[in-house]
Amino acid sequence: MAAVPPPSPPPAASIEQRLASQAVAATGAELADLFEYRLAERVTIRRNQSALVPFVQASVTAERISLWNDSTGARPRRAVWITNTSPLTLDAGSLSVVDGGAFAGEGLVESLKPGERRLVSYAADLGVQVSARASETPQRIVRVRAAKGMLTQDSEQRWRRTYTIRNNDRDARLVIVEHPIRAEWALSASSKPAESTAAVHRFRVTVPAGQTTTLDVDEIKGFGVTAEMLKMGVEDLRLVITNAESRASVERALAPLAAKAAEVEQIQVDTILRQNKLQAIAQDQARIRENMTALKGSAAERRLLERYTRQLDEQESAIESLTREVAELESRHERARQEFADLVATFSFDVTP
């Protein structure tokens, strides 16, 4: 019996025609963090042949932008902002960008779940230049509160970074500026990014052709300090008033406390002045007594002794007067301190700008 040769495989063109005639589609299924594609129809590939199977064919939205951050230097990167508007997860891989019918560059894209968005850079943007500079303002008190004997100061420090973007191209540019997120700093209400990630805030800036645009990003860092009002003096209260954002309001609120604190301190100053006078008289009396001891008893020395005696007598009268004044001032100081403590116990206010 003659051997029958095996049938020859059909030409490749017939396979391509067959695949083209079929509506090959795929459905996606999530597998935990993974995913799979399932073809709607079976595809047969004969031995020693191959085929390209278009199992996912869907339109996604892409926005052309220029992407700048601290790592790009003066020149941003050309990029596309891709949003997966298909119902399927798109696998990670390389991405080729065709712009105006010509190859513009390529990049890498991570896997995209339905509805997710990614920035993918693919080339340097030689038509745009970006520079950045920072400025910082002194710390200011933005809120002062008093209650239950404690004074709380809420302060903030402001930091601004200004981005200057120059577009030397003939077409307008949409530039995405990535501003780094810093611990303990928060964006001010005037700085609103298009979106934020775990590492950066992204701001959209449209720069007309041949023009320069600036972007100001303001950040705020807050502090809180609490102090016992009984331990605060006039200078402490003056610092709170001076550094407050709403100085007039804080000054009015603290006026009763500052007045009583000033009274307490003034009585203390008056007491110290009189105590210093007493100490000076005591030292002078010691000198006079030493001089009196050295006198020999001549007529001239007797006249000097009488003079020293009158001085001692006058000083004794001054000592009596100063001693009474010191005792009275100490009593007044004690009363003033108690009045200050009573005022602190009932003192309450809350001042914000």
Image (cartoon, rainbow, N blue to C red):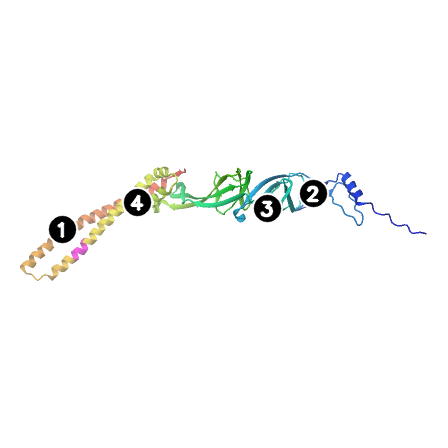
Among the two numbered marks 1 and 3 on one chain, the one whose residue lies closer to the N terminus? 3
Helix, strand or loop at label 3? It is: strand
The alpha-carbon separation of the residues under discs 1 and 3 comes to 98 Å
Which residue: 16% across, 58% down? 287
Q: What element carries label 4?
A: helix
For the residues labelled 4 and 2, the Cα–Cα distance comes to 77 Å
Residue 11 in percent (x, y) is at 81, 45
**Which type of secondary structure does the marked residue at label 1 adopt?**
helix
Q: x, y percentage for residue 58?
A: 68, 39
Q: What label sits on residue 115 in the rendered view? A: none
Residue stretch rendered in magenta on the structure: 281-286
Nearest to the eye among marks 3 and 2: give it: 3
Disc nearest the viewer among 4 and 1: 1
Pointer 4 or 1: first along the chain: 1
Depth-wise, is mark 4 or mark 2 nearer the camera? 2
Amino acid beneath label 1: Glu
Q: In this view, does 13 lie to the left or right of 270?
A: right
Of 31 and 165, the residue lying toward us:
165
Q: Is residue 307 positioned above or below 252 on the image?
A: below
* Mark before the other along the chain sequence, 3 or 2: 2
The quadrant in which residue 262 appears is: top left
In the image, which disc is placed on residue 337? 4
Q: Which mark is residue 123?
A: 3
Q: Which residue is tagged 2?
A: 29
Give the residue at x 24% y 49%: 272
- Residue 239 on the magenta segment: no
Q: In this view, does 272 lie to the left or right of 167?
A: left
